[in-house]
Image: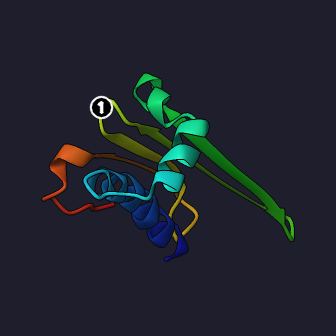
Amino acid sequence: MLSRLIVLLLLGVPVLAGTSRAQKHSPIAEQIAKTYGLDSFGQIEAMRYTFNLDLSGKHISRSWVWEPKTGRVSYDGQDKDDKPLKVTYLQSDSTKSLTW
């Protein structure tokens, strides 16, 4: 259940980022965004995030990759039964539901 929630949250971030670009922001917010590299966002090939946890003798590992240019989001981890799970989602297929 938690892994599904995390995947759904991860997949929602790029969608929200795409819809929020059309909104107007305050000059301060735009200045902060530019200071932290917003103008270079188009040069990003991929963002990767890996989470590892050792808890009570159990190893938990999750990895996500977001490729903004292709709109591909990938998840690699375990499902609720600790079986390996790999999911790839294309933002252009947002009308389709995810199944795993």
Residue at x 39% of width, y 58% of height: 25
Mark 1 sits on what residue? Answer: 70
Q: Compare residues 36 and 57 and report the one nearer the observer.
A: 36
Left or right, 33 with reference to 71: right
Q: Where is residue 1 in the image (x, y as percent from the top left)?
A: 49, 77
75 lies above or below 4: above
Above/below status of 41 relative to 90: above
- Identify the image quadrant of residue 12: bottom left
**Residue displayed at 27% across by 62% down:** 99
Tag 1: residue type?
Answer: Thr
User: What residue is drawn where x is 86% and y is 71%?
Assistant: 56
Which image quarter is the C terminus in? bottom left
Q: Nearer the viewer, residue 41 or 65?
A: 41
Q: Give the farthest residue toward the right.
A: 56
Q: Which of 48 and 24 is in front in this view?
A: 24
| Image height of 2 relative to 78, above or below | below
Q: What secondary structure is found at the residue carrying circle 1? A: loop
**Looking at the picture, how far across and down is residue 23, in whole percent?**
29, 58
Label 1 CA crowd tier, 10 Å (few <14, some 14–19, many 20+): few
Describe the colour scheme in one phrase.
rainbow
